[in-house]
Image: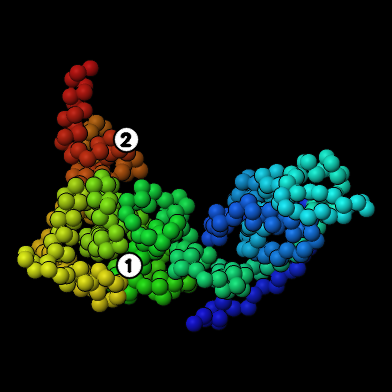
């Protein structure tokens, strides 16, 4: 059920009738041709585009364009692929707009089986001709029958009163799309919210390594990675307590808190988190388990769900920790096979395997319990180097460390002021060093950057060795 109260009253739509010449000319410098959430250009083919050109030449009125005024200009690409300062988002007209552009740029011609039309009192044949050929043979024809034709355009919004992301989503999906049947991810794709944008970007448009390498099979066409990444985002927010099915995923895309930002309270982590930061950390973990591609043929949906649960158990210990992926990779595939393999001599399934058949709340909770039993998490998780959740020393701890050092830098022995000091870790944070006073060194920034993961004693010995060899 749609909450129309949240959508609210729309800002006014201003009808306009610019000419094709204007749409291809000065308006192209103002309109984003293909907003990321409406990536549908690949479904357009030359034959369909030729049909649009034929319609205009035959004096058929084509479907109106719909554009949405934005609150401020932003960098985007126009219909020619040039970077512009866009003022309007193209909510509906991409394919028609592209067809006009293709003809204008001579990427397509008039359909071969185009009928004779009357021009200047005579019958003329345009079938199979490109723009330049028509202009050369019949001067003025295209200006009158194509470039001067007016196209109806609805311009939604005005200065200070523009559509919200929820309104743009509703307008595209419910009003302009004629309720076309779409699969789950195609339905979410036009959602104009920040979480939808980050899923599209990381999974498909500018994919992170996990999706760029196509390391597993998920199976719903070009948006297959969006679906799995949306599940990762949802799991970070709710864990196994809300099923990973269509309705909950749709609702996540429409969460008010994720409409314009990517911070939300995670009931699973019990705090406000940057959802995209966590999602990328999960994707990095999964990538490092799969990157050698040895088990790529195994990675169907059931393996992908099992790996998500396995990763989640480890990430709950702290996304900042260091993970020994070589060991974890071997452990995951060994343990997963043990969980899905029936006892020796007995055919059939296992409880864990049954849990992977659907992403219901009960199945996910039980699958995680079985993973936790297998990993024996009552003991410390193997192959995890614990890193302090705090990485930066507060100024007071740096001041106390500096006082303890007698206000000198421990590397060069020269006087050091609090202003010039940074807080360095004696045992590096990246290898598990704690951000506490006992592990704090007041040190010059250049030395701290140069230390890497060495301890202070190791670094000083290295510097002394370098001097001795000069």
Residue at x-position 69% and y-position 63%: 65
Choose between 11 and 240: the one closer to the eye: 240
Choose between 448 and 257: the one closer to the eye: 257
Pair 2/1: label in front: 1
Q: Is residue 334 left or right of residue 214?
A: left
Number of marks in the rendered image = 2
Report which quarter residue 97 is drawn in. bottom right
Name the residue that disc number 1 marks: 235
Residue at x-position 43% and y-position 58%: 221
Residue at x-position 25% and y-position 55%: 298
The CA distance from mark 2 to mark 1 is 41 Å
Report which quarter residue 234 is drawn in. bottom left
Q: Is residue 127 left or right of residue 76?
A: right
Tag 1 secondary structure: helix
Residue 273 appears in the figure: no
Name the residue that disc number 2 marks: 446
- Residue at the extreme top of the image, as rendered: 470
Asked if marks 2 and 1 touch (Cβ < 8 Å), the reply is no
Q: Is residue 129 left or right of residue 245?
A: right
Percent across and percent down for residue 91 are 62, 63
Tag 2 secondary structure: helix
């Amino acid at each position: 059920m749609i909450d129309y109260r949240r959508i609210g009253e729309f800002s006014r739509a201003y009808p306009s009738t610019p000419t094709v010449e204007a749409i291809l000319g000065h308006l192209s410098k103002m309109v984003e041709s293909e907003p990321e959430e409406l990536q549908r250009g690949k479904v357009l083919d030359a034959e369909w585009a030729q049909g649009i050109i034929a319609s205009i030449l035959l004096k058929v009125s084509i479907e109106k364009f719909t554009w949405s005024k934005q609150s401020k200009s932003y960098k985007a690409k126009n219909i020619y692929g040039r970077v512009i300062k866009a003022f309007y988002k193209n909510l509906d007209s991409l394919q028609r707009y592209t067809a006009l552009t293709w003809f204008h740029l001579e990427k397509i011609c008039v359909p071969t089986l185009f009928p004779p039309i009357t021009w200047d009192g005579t019958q003329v044949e345009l079938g199979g001709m490109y723009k330049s050929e028509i202009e050369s043979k019949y001067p003025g024809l295209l200006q009158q029958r194509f470039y001067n034709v007016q196209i109806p355009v609805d311009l939604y919004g005005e200065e200070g009163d523009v559509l919200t992301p929820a309104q743009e989503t509703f307008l595209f999906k419910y009003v302009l799309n004629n309720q076309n049947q779409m699969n789950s991810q195609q339905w979410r794709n036009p959602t104009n919210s920040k979480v939808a944008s980050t899923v599209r970007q990381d999974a498909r448009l500018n994919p992170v390594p996990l999706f760029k390498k196509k390391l597993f099979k998920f199976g719903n066409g070009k948006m297959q990675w969006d679906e799995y990444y949306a599940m990762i985002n949802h799991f970070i927010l709710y864990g196994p307590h809300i099923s990973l099915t269509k309705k909950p995923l749709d609702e996540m895309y429409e969460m008010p808190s994720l409409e314009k930002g990517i911070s939300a309270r995670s009931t699973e982590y019990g705090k406000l988190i940057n959802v995209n930061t966590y999602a990328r950390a999960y994707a990095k973990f999964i990538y490092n388990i799969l990157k050698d591609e040895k088990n790529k043929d195994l990675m169907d949906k059931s393996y992908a769900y099992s790996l998500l649960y396995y990763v989640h158990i480890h990430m709950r210990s702290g996304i900042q920790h260091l993970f020994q992926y070589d060991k974890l990779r071997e452990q995951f595939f060994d343990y997963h096979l043990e969980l899905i393999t029936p006892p020796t001599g007995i055919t059939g399934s296992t409880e864990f395997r049954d849990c992977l058949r659907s992403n219901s709340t009960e199945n996910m909770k039980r699958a995680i319990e079985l993973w936790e039993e297998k990993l024996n998490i009552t003991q410390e998780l193997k192959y995890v180097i614990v890193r302090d959740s705090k990485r930066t020393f507060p100024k007071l701890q740096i001041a106390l460390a500096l006082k303890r050092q007698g206000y000198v830098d421990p590397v060069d022995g020269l006087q050091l002021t609090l202003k010039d000091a940074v807080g360095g870790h004696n045992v590096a944070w990246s290898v598990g060093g704690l951000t506490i006073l006992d592990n704090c060194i007041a040190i010059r920034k250049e030395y701290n950057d140069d230390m890497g993961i060495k301890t202070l004693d190791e670094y000083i010995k290295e510097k002394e060795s370098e001097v001795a060899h000069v």
